[in-house]
């Protein structure tokens, strides 16, 4: 499809974090944008405020008249869908039967980035923070990037950054443009991308409903690595798992055999201070404006990318210190001497382990209470033992029921199953409508909410309850 000929773009699942970034992009390009989503959220409210038409009932009558006007203008209308939309969705069926151009989100992102200098960040964990930090460094360096991100950056309050040369309607990225993208491994979506520079942060087993086993996860990441045309940057511990066409650049939080690594890490006034060792020199007295040891490692990956682009050390240093993070990634909502409340997107056992371990490191001697909403029946089933071990790191654990997302229930898979596997004695299951009362009955010192479902809708009520 020729993007300059497209006049209308319709999204099935427009409220997703990746889909909404594309919707914002086409809206900024002067296209007519509309879409469907299952439920209204703060993000869909923002899209509507930006002039995008959205409805929340699956029915053909809700599709805008200019989309379904006869004869169908299928050559100049683009339909974008997310794999979370079922194939029997009535609007999807309508578009499919009538010959519309229907593309997955990842395919469209591949089309947008194919003419630009693309920096992609892949990995089962850490890609949103790392890609957002890279984009922030590039912004600070005056390189004027565009960025399609998997979270809302705290610095820019959006998941889409647009290069200044795209402010004119219908203007496309050129070979001089730099685009930073989060490369999603779900459904092998990242194989639509052919970046010049790519980072892979992790290749833990995940999305086994798609891949079947860890071996196929690693195989898919290897295929992605072979599509990188210039520089491939890998976390040191996964170098042996990725079959790349050339010699990759490695990074680590503390492995001094890596090309880039951190050393002399310490916490001062709630911030990490450390040094980053590069092949050329040592960046001393680095201060990261972001909590969590795992984010120190993400910062080393971002520095490795910045060094490939010859960004000066002083710019990198200032960008690391001024980066405010990403919404729902170790996101502080209360931070006082009496109570700390953090919200995090962690939904995989390794992410839970990283978040909880970082909190315990930052608040030694404090009681850590965690509220976790498992995401997907299949993920809960596949990693039940690992989830139990990670949750046992908490002093107190409150489990919510599983958020099903795109899945139907699996017999025998439940939050009770996880609870039974945990060794901790201070654990319980709580229904969503009873959660505030449960919190009110506890002596909270440090509270962390974790999950990728709709637990984020409870963050503000929890904050208000704890602030009373």
Image: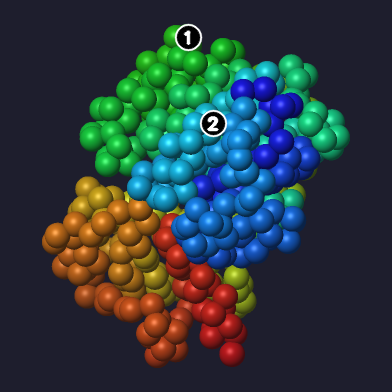
- Asked whether residue 257 is in view, the answer is no
- Asked whether residue 8 is in view, the answer is yes
With respect to residue 146, does 55 lie above or below? below
- Which of the 4 quarters of the picture holds residue 43? bottom right
Residues at discs 2 and 1 in contact (Cβ within 8 Å): no
- Quadrant for the N terminus, please: top right
Query: Which numbered dot is residue 101?
Result: 2
Q: Position of residue 302 (x, y in %)?
A: 62, 34
- Quadrant for the C terminus, please: bottom right
Q: Residue furthest front?
A: 70
- Identify the residue shown where x is 54% and y is 83%: 466
How many numbered marks does the figure carry?
A: 2
Q: Position of residue 324 (x, y in %)?
A: 68, 54
- Identify the residue shown where x is 39% and y is 82%: 433
- Identify the residue shown where x is 52% and y is 79%: 462
Q: Position of residue 203 (x, y in %)?
A: 37, 33
Give the side of residue 282 with respect to residue 301, left or right: right
Marks 2 and 1, how far apart at CA: 37 Å
Q: Position of residue 246 (x, y in %)?
A: 47, 9
Q: Residue furthest left?
A: 412
Give the side of residue 437 with respect to residue 81, left or right: left
Q: Secondary structure at mark 2?
A: strand
Say which label, 2 or 1, has the lower sequence index: 2
Disc 2 vs disc 1: which is toward the camera? 2
- Identify the residue shown where x is 45% and y is 67%: 455
Q: Secondary structure at mark 1?
A: loop
Residue matched to label 1: 246
- Which of the 4 quarters of the picture holds residue 207? top left
With respect to residue 321, does 366 lie above or below? below
């Amino acid at each position: 499809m020729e993007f300059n000929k497209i006049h209308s773009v319709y999204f099935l699942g427009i409220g997703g974090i990746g889909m909404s970034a594309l919707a914002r992009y086409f809206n900024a390009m002067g296209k007519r944008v509309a879409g469907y989503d299952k439920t209204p959220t703060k993000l869909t409210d923002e899209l509507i405020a930006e002039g995008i038409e959205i409805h929340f009932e699956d029915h053909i009558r809700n599709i805008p008249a200019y989309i379904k006007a006869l004869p169908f203008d299928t050559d100049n209308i683009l339909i974008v869908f997310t794999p979370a939309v079922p194939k029997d969705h009535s609007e999807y069926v309508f578009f499919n039967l009538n010959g519309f151009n229907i593309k997955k989100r990842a395919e469209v992102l591949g089309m947008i980035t194919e003419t630009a200098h693309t920096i992609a960040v892949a990995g089962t964990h850490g890609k949103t923070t790392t890609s957002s930090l890279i984009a922030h460094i590039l912004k600070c360096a005056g390189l004027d990037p565009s960025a399609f991100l998997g979270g809302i950056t705290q610095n820019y309050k959006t998941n889409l950054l647009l290069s200044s040369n795209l402010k004119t309607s219908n203007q496309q990225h050129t070979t001089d443009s730099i685009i930073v993208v989060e490369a999603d491994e779900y459904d092998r979506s990242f194989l639509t991308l052919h970046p010049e520079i790519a980072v892979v942060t992790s290749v833990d087993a995940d999305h086994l409903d798609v891949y079947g086993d860890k071996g196929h996860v690693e195989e898919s990441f290897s295929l992605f690595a072979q599509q990188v045309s210039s520089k491939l940057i890998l976390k040191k511990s996964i170098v042996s798992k990725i079959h790349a066409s050339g010699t990759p650049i490695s990074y680590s939080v503390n492995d001094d055999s890596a090309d880039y690594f951190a050393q002399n890490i310490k916490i001062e006034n709630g911030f990490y201070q450390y040094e980053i060792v590069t092949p050329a020199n040592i960046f001393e007295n680095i201060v990261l404006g972001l909590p969590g040891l795992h984010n120190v490692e993400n910062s080393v990956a971002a520095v490795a990318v910045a060094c490939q682009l010859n960004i000066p050390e002083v710019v990198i240093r200032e960008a690391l210190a001024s980066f405010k993070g990403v919404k729902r990634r170790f996101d502080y909502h209360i931070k006082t001497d009496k109570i700390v409340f953090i919200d995090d997107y962690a939904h995989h056992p390794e992410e839970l382990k990283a978040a909880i371990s970082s909190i315990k490191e930052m608040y030694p001697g404090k009681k850590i209470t965690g509220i976790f909403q498992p995401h997907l029946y299949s993920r809960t089933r596949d990693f039940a033992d690992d989830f139990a071990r990670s949750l046992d790191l908490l002093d107190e654990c409150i489990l919510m029921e599983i958020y099903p997302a795109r899945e139907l229930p699996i017999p025998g898979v439940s939050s009770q199953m996880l609870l039974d596997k945990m060794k901790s004695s201070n654990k319980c299951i709580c229904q969503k409508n009873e959660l505030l009362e449960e919190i009110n009955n506890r002596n909270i010192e440090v509270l962390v909410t974790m999950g990728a479902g709709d637990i984020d809708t409870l963050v503000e009520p929890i904050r208000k309850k704890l602030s009373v």
